[in-house]
Structures are given as C-alpha cells and as structure tokens.
C-alpha cells in the first residue's frame, strides 16, 4: 500500500518540491498551507493521491483537522514534514518589530510543535517518520538573528524527538539547508540551492531502511 506524507508549507518552495518528489516516488501527500489556490493547482497537476488542506499552521485545530482528513482519505500516516516557516523582515532586537517576532515564533516554533502533536498518535501506529525544517541558521550563529534562534529551537527539539521516537521504532530528521532559491526571498537566488535539492534530501531520509535514522541533513550551496 502507498505510504502517506503530510506536509505543512506545501504551497511553494521546499514544501511544494517535496510534494512533487514524494508523489513521484509513489506516496500519497496531504498539502497544508494558507493559499488554497496554490494547493488546488498542485492537486490538479498531480491527481487524487494528493489532498489540498487549506489552513493556518499556527492554528492547532486547523492542523488537527488537516491530519484527520489526510488519515481519513489515505487510511493512515507514515510521515509528517513540519516545514512551514517565515523569516524576519526587520532585523535585530533593538530595531526589530516585536509583533513580527511573535508571528515568527508562532509559526516556526508553535506551528511545528502543533504538527508534531497532531501527527504523533498516527505515526506511533505506523512506526513513522517526523521531519522538521531547520536551517544552516539553526546550527551556526548569525549576528543578532531572531529567525536563526527559532531554528536553533527546531534543531534542539528534533534531537529530543529522535530520542523519544526511537523508543517505539519511530524516526526524526532535521533538514538543515543553507540558502535556497524560493519565495522566502524577495529576489531570485539562481546560483544557490534549488527547492528540488532539498526535496531530494527529504526523500533520502524518508527512504532509508527503517533500521537507519538520518538524524540531520545539512545541505549547503556549493558556492
Ligand atoms: N529558503 C531558504 O533559504 C531556507 C533555508 C533554510 C530553511 N528554510 C526554511 O524552509 C521552510 C520553507 O521555506 P521556503 O524556503 O520553501 O519558503 P516559501 O516558499 O516562502 O515557503 C513557505 C511556506 O510556508 C507556508 N506558510 C507560511 N505561513 C504559514 C502559515 N501561517 N500556515 C501554513 N503555512 C504557512 C507558505 O504558504 P502560504 O503562504 O500559502 O501559507 C509556504 O508554503 C521554512 O521553514 C524556512 O524557514 C528556508
């Protein structure tokens, strides 16, 4: 039977590229993000092994509904990819915008915790796999970066979840890319990583034998 993957932040960039890669590898995919038009376009492109789940990842009830719909349509959940995230436009602690910090913490930390919370009961049944999008900014220090600090949370939590999940045969992977050419940035970055490169890293971790856990994929542009 085909395996099932739930992805947040699936409407563009790394999430959308991972949806394509997983679909091509035979997976069923549940796509969560706010832009229902973009999710519907992905469903139209790929077909009925893909499900659009419009919603806000910072809303626990919305993620509960999205995972429930995924499980109902495909019969279970084998992997969840907490990938939705945003950057900080106004840099620094003295000059930054506290309202923006709250939105960033809400999505990059709380949204990711919600994905984990609603997925875990299903993943326990399948001895499944949790993947979290960290960042190169979550494994080295960047002067004053609040965005980077949210990713340090992701890296710490991913290690802790790997230890918890191994107790029942589950796996947890943090995906840590450097700069990727996605709508995350206002300008194109054609000479940096492409979203497909990161999707390949996700698929590498997902498709290992269950005895092998890829704890982290640290992927940098070569230049
Ligand atoms: N690009 C890079 O260089 C880079 C490097 C390292 C790590 N990352 C991380 O990679 C992840 C994906 O980013 P990306 O580069 O692929 O950028 P992106 O194309 O901007 O993707 C962000 C995704 O998150 C979704 N999203 C934003 N707010 C949301 C919310 N409240 N609820 C649900 N979904 C929401 C967006 O869709 P909607 O707007 O439709 O909701 C979109 O699908 C993020 O966690 C980012 O921090 C990026």
Image (cartoon, grey):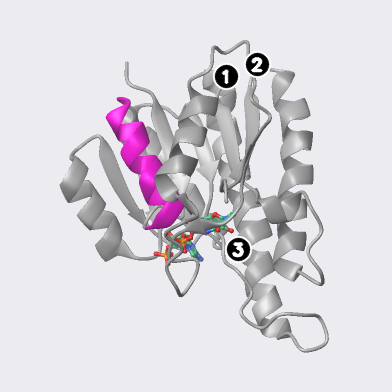
The circle on residue 107 is 3
Packing grade of label 3 (10 A; few <14, some 14-19, many >=20) is many
Q: How far is mark 2 from mark 3, CA to CA?
A: 28 Å
Q: Earlier in the sequence, mark 2 or mark 3?
A: 3
Q: How far is mark 1 from mark 3, CA to CA?
A: 26 Å
Q: Residue at x 68, y 57 (%)?
A: 109
Q: Residue at x 32, y 30 (%)?
A: 74
What is the chief secondary structure element of the magenta stretch? helix
Q: How far is mark 2 from mark 1, CA to CA?
A: 5 Å
State left or right for residue 171 relative to residue 208.
right
Q: Report if the beta carbon of the residue with label 3 is closer than 8 angstroms to ligand 1.
A: yes
Residue 69: where, in percent of width, then height?
A: 37, 43
Magenta stretch contains residue 17? yes
State left or right for residue 199 relative to residue 106.
left
Find numbered disc 1 in the image and state the secondary structure of the residue it sits on: loop
Magenta segment range? 12-26
Magenta stretch contains residue 111? no
Give 30 or 26, whichever is nearer the viewer. 26
List the residue tagged with mark 2. 169
Q: Quadrant of residue 1?
A: top left
Q: Earlier in the sequence, mark 1 or mark 3?
A: 3
Query: Badges 2 and 1: C-beta atoms under 8 Å apart?
Result: yes
């Amino acid at each position: 039977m085909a395996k099932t993957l739930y992805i947040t932040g699936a409407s563009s960039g790394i999430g959308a590229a991972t949806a394509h890669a997983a679909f091509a590898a035979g997976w069923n995919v549940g796509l969560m993000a706010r832009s229902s038009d973009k999710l519907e376009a992905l469903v139209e492109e790929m077909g009925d092994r893909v499900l659009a789940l419009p919603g806000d990842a910072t809303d626990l009830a919305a993620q509960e509904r999205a995972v429930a719909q995924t499980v109902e349509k495909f019969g279970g959940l084998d992997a969840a990819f907490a990938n939705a995230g945003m950057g900080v436009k106004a840099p620094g602690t003295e000059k930054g915008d506290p309202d923006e910090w709250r939105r960033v913490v809400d999505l990059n930390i709380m949204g990711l915790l919600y994905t984990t919370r609603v997925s875990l009961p299903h993943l326990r049944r399948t001895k499944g796999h949790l993947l979290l999008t960290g960042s190169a900014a979550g494994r080295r220090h960047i002067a004053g970066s609040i965005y980077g600090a949210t990713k340090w949370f992701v890296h710490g939590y991913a290690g802790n979840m790997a230890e918890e999940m191994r107790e029942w045969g589950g796996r947890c992977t943090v995906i840590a890319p450097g700069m990727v050419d996605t709508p995350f940035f206002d300008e194109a970055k054609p000479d940096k990583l492409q979203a497909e490169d990161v999707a390949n890293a996700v698929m590498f971790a997902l498709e290992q034998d269950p005895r092998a856990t890829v704890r982290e994929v640290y992927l940098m542009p070569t230049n």
